[in-house]
Image (spheres, grey):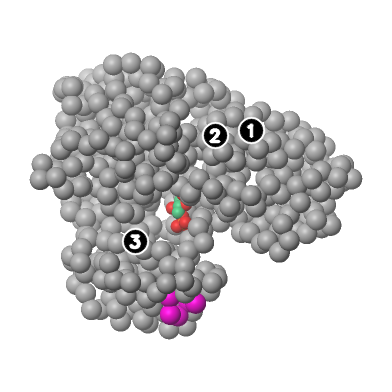
């Protein structure tokens, strides 16, 4: 390591005095103007991780659902998964090191992780459409090159596309071709093959309205459209030509406000969906005939997918174990439906796809989704091989099911939750099952729920346990929540510090919307009072 060169370049990416950041739910996130040093240092760290794993490592510059002024960065590990926890700690140490300590921290990490410094390093970089992203990705490149790493800058990509590129590169192309065309080809071929097998194919199934949150999803869907040919026609809204990124639109807005995005023209019964700012989340919705807004979130997406996969497995007579992984945000009705009606085991992890992904890997087929629309399905390699084999061998009816499974495996982005891939999976399942969006929605009825945010001086005063369902600190908070929950029927509530925004998140569900709203408000007030709330006290809605 040329430590003198690191010191010299690091000074050009100085850390603002007193700034401390944490590698959170999905990397570092804060105001873009505070991130230059973090980007440079994550370039350095990616080189060390690449040398250590002898693999290509990804660096994605994005703040996903956060406001346009924010930005962020996360590292992508060799199989397209999130960075290993021990390296998250290294990332935090390096990002927070004072200028004079940067080289020492680098040396410490290399020693602790037994990094062979002679090893070549290769890093791939992607970025979203935020105005700050291009310059920040240059700072990543500066970090990579000063440590002698090689790189490929993919430029504008959705986050899941970068995860896909990393996975492809580290499996010598077995997972797919590590190019944007390779991604479009893999997904569109699987989609076309899959939907060819549908017996119903009315016009209704061929068109979909997509709110792109004024983000990268719009650019990439436009590029992909001709690959899908007649299979699916998407009409894009909030495509970035005028509105602001994630402002009053996008999956996070739609899910948390439970209302349609601005700028979308919805007619009753039309199938619509929203991506978030970097296209790794998706939620569906429609207006009922009576004009009511109906949200179909990640829980219902997981239900549709796991039901479909289970049915195919039954048809081919394979007894593989399927598990569904959710978080505390999963609607109580979805968990009950999956366990009691579908007889699928359900597991709960902490928020953050890294936790869900990890758990889902334990099953032959693991379906994981956060209620906010972030998720995918994972298939064990041996399962993939077996299904490929069965698709060649079985008799006619079984072969059709095995072929569908083979195609759907290719349609999922198994490196990360991916709005484009999930959208194609959902569209294919709906047409194959001949389901309308209303019939899908009618699988079960969500318990009314509400999510709120509370500002506190330091959100770290809240710590949780039991997959974030219970607060450990500050003292008295959990007791207060328990007492409030008791006041309502079918109720549940929890609080947790966000790992992407400077807020505490509050979730409540109950037997009616009015009760869910009032429970959420009362719990917010308890957080405000017991955890050092700042600004205005939470008010009743
Ligand atoms: C990221 C994570 C998700 C998480 C979300 C909110 O999503 O990838 O797993 O649910 O943040 O996390 P928190 O509640 O900790 O703020 P995205 O789409 O913003 O990358």
Tell me the tag on residue 162: 2
Tell me the tag on residue 124: 1
Magenta-highlighted residues: 528-532
Q: Which residue is mark 3?
A: 451
Pointer 3 or 1: first along the chain = 1
Q: Few, some or many C-alpha atoms within 10 Å of disc 3 (few <14, some 14-19, many ≥20)? A: many
Q: Is residue 258 visible?
A: yes
Pointer 3 or 2: first along the chain = 2
Tell me the tag on residue 449: none
**Position in image of residue 175 (x %, y %):** 51, 28
Frontmost residue, 65 versus 25:
65
Q: Does 378 appear above or below 221?
A: below
Q: Secondary structure at mark 3?
A: strand
The CA span between labels 3 and 1 is 36 Å
Frontmost residue, 360 versus 456:
456
The CA span between labels 2 and 1 is 8 Å
Is 425 in the magenta?
no
Q: In the figure, is residue 380 to the left or right of 2?
A: left
Residue visible at 48% across and 73% down in the picture: 534
Main SS type for the magenta part? Answer: helix
Q: Are marks 2 and 1 in contact (CB under 8 Å)?
A: yes
**Position in image of residue 309 (x %, y %):** 29, 37
Residue visible at 59% across and 25% down in the picture: 172
**Position in image of residue 156 (x %, y %):** 55, 30
């Amino acid at each position: 390591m040329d430590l003198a060169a690191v010191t010299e370049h690091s000074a050009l990416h100085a850390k603002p005095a007193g700034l401390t950041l944490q590698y959170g739910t999905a990397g570092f996130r804060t105001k873009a103007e505070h991130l230059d040093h973090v980007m440079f240092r994550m370039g350095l760290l990616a080189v060390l991780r690449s040398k250590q794993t002898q693999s290509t490592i990804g660096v994605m510059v994005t703040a996903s659902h956060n406001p346009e002024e924010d930005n962020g960065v996360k590292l992508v590990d060799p199989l397209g998964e999130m960075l290993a926890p021990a390296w998250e700690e290294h990332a935090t140490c390096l990002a927070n090191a004072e200028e004079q300590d940067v080289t020492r921290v680098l040396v410490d990490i290399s020693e602790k992780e037994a990094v062979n410094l002679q090893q070549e390093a290769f890093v791939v970089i992607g970025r979203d459409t935020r105005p700050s992203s291009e310059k920040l990705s240059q700072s990543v490149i500066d970090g990579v090159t000063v440590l002698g790493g090689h790189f490929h800058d993919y430029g504008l990509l959705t986050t899941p596309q970068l995860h896909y590129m990393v996975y492809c590169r580290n499996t010598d192309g077995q997972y797919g071709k590590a190019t944007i065309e390779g991604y479009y080809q893999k997904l569109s071929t699987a989609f076309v093959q899959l939907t060819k097998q549908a017996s119903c194919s009315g016009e209704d199934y061929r068109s979909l309205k997509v709110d792109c949150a004024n983000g990268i999803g719009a650019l990439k869907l436009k590029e992909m459209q001709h690959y899908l040919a007649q299979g699916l026609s998407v009409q894009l809204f909030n495509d970035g030509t005028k509105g602001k990124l994630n402002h009053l639109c996008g999956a996070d807005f739609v899910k948390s406000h439970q209302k349609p995005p601005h700028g979308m023209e919805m007619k009753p019964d039309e199938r619509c969906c929203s991506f978030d700012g970097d296209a790794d989340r998706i939620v569906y919705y429609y207006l009922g005939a009576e004009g009511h807004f109906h949200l179909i979130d990640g829980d219902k997406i997981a239900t549709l997918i796991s039901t479909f996969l289970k049915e195919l497995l039954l048809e081919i007579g394979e007894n593989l174990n399927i598990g569904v992984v959710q978080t505390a945000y999963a609607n109580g009705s979805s968990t009950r439906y999956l366990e009691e009606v579908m007889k699928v085991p359900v597991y709960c992890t902490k928020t953050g796809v890294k936790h869900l992904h990890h758990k889902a890997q334990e099953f032959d087929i693991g379906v994981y989704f956060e209620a906010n629309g972030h998720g995918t399905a994972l298939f064990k390699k041996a399962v993939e091989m077996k299904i490929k084999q069965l698709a060649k061998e079985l008799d006619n009816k079984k072969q059709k099911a095995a072929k569908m499974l083979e195609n759907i495996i290719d349609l999922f982005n198994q490196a990360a939750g991916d709005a484009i891939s999930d959208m194609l999976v959902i569209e294919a399942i709906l047409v194959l099952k001949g389901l309308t969006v209303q019939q899908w929605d009618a699988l079960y009825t969500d318990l009314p729920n509400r999510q709120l945010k509370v500002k506190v001086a330091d959100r770290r005063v809240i710590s949780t346990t039991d997959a974030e369902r219970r607060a450990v600190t500050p003292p008295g908070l959990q007791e207060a929540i328990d007492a409030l929950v008791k006041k309502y029927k079918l109720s549940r509530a929890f609080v947790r510090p966000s790992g992407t925004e400077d807020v505490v998140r509050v979730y409540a569900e109950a037997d009616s919307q009015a009760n869910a709203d009032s429970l959420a408000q009362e719990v917010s007030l308890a957080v405000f009072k017991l955890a050092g709330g700042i600004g205005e006290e939470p008010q009743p809605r």
